[in-house]
Image: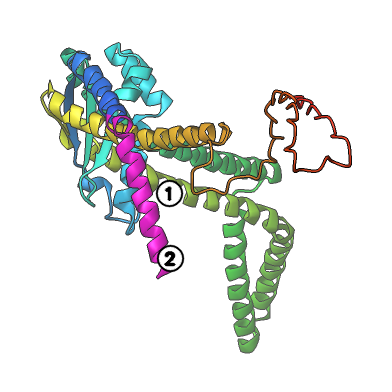
Amino acid sequence: MNDSIGVKVEIVDYLRVARRRLWVLVGVPLLASGAAAGIVLLAPQQFSGTAYVAAPALVGGAAGTQYTGTQAANQFVAAFGAAVTSPRVLADVAGDTGVTPERLRDGLAVTQVGASSQLEVTYTAGDRATVAPVLTATTTRALAFLFSSQVGIATGEVEAANADVTAATKAIGEWEKANKVSQPDRIYQATLGELTSLRQQQLSMQAVGNSRGADAAAAAITAAQRKLDELGPKLPDYQALLAQRDAATGALSQAREGLQAARAQAQAADPKQVTSIGEAHEVSRMAELVRTALPVGGAGLLLGVLLVGVLELLSRARQAGRPAAAPTASAPTPTVPPKPAQTPTVPPKPAQTPTEPPASAQPPTESPVPAQTVPAARP
């Protein structure tokens, strides 16, 4: 209960202070809003245009597509927005249109249409004639930056894989030339098959008693075995060269598939097919005024509240530094010692002459005492 009463008292104090400083709370926001409105209304007329980028074939689809998965649309939007403001794209657009990169960076904005892969590229400038050329150059350069570069990378991979195949084939030819044998793996397999056949013939001739034919078969078996013994130690090196050529051939095949996919994406990102440029129009000053004056007025109100607080603190500090006022009637009166009373000056009374007593009175036994003069008290 006491806490709620204390809060109410504080709110009442705040309201009392705000009412006393109302000119600050009202004047500062009005001054800030007026200044912002003046800047907006006195600024040169701005013109704006929008380019629409709709390329559904670039997002999702086959696994070889650059942007796949559940976040494909967001990834494409983020990549396109970064490409639009990249130094390379800005430099290319500046070279195409004659607009400085700094002005391009300030005037370009990329927004996503809902949760789709469709984009809106907006450009605002003071010259109507530059709006459409800037939008055309920006969308073209950004799409080329994202997808034409992939074609270049894939082309480089194909060239590298092709060079590996050529080097492996050349190494095989040099080995065959040095060993004076061509395709020793095939010769070895053919000789091995021939050796097996000769042994069967030898066995058949020995079974029928043809010793002469059996001896001829034995000689052929010996020659074939000699050939196998010569080729056997050489085969590992040759087979290693063959494995290198096969790996290079496989890499070349994959690189060609990647190049084909990159070319398909670049074709799907053709600016003439996926972009459309809207007409330039004047930017509404009223919308710009509302968009600018309201935040500035809110900031002015906050500044006014802070100024009221500062002024109130300074006022209380000055009041605390002043001397204390005179005590009121209800305050206890300090005890002051009484001043000594002044004795008034009394003039001396004249001495009275004693009269003769009557005859019947007896004379005083003592002589009369003369009157004494009381000295005047000093002030």
**Image location (x, y in percent) of residue 13:** 37, 48
Quickly name the residue at label 1. Answer: 253
- Horizontal arrangement in the rendering, residue 65 relative to residue 223 (left or right): left
Q: Is mark 2 on a helix, strand or loop?
A: helix
Rendered residue at 59%/78% (across/down): 201
Quarter assignment of residue 207: bottom right
- Crowding near the residue tagged with mark 2, few <14, some 14–19, many ≥20 C-alpha atoms within 10 Å: few
- Which kind of residue does numbered mark 1 sit on? Ser
**Image location (x, y in percent) of residue 280:** 13, 22
Separation of residues labelled 2 and 1 (CA atoms): 81 Å
Quickly name the residue at label 2. Answer: 3
Quarter assignment of residue 122: top left
First of labels 2, 1 by sequence position: 2
Rendered residue at 27%/20% (across/down): 35
Q: Which callout, 2 or 1, points to the residue nearer the camera?
A: 2
**Image location (x, y in percent) of residue 375:** 79, 26
Q: Give the residue at the far right of this rendering.
A: 366
Q: Does the magenta stretch include residue 356?
A: no
- Image: 153 above or below 91: below
Q: Which of 359 and 139 is in front in this view?
A: 359
Residues in magenta, as a range = 1-26
Colouring chosen for the image of the structure: rainbow
Q: Which of 144 and 226 is in front in this view?
A: 144
Quarter containing the N terminus = bottom left
Quarter assignment of residue 354: top right
Judge whether residue 246 can be spotted in this image. yes
Q: Which of 59 and 125 is in front in this view?
A: 125
- Horizontal arrangement in the rendering, residue 261 relative to residue 270 (left or right): right
Q: Give the residue at the far top of this rendering.
A: 98
Q: Is residue 12 magenta?
A: yes
Q: Main secondary structure of the magenta part?
A: helix
- Which kind of residue does numbered mark 2 sit on? Asp
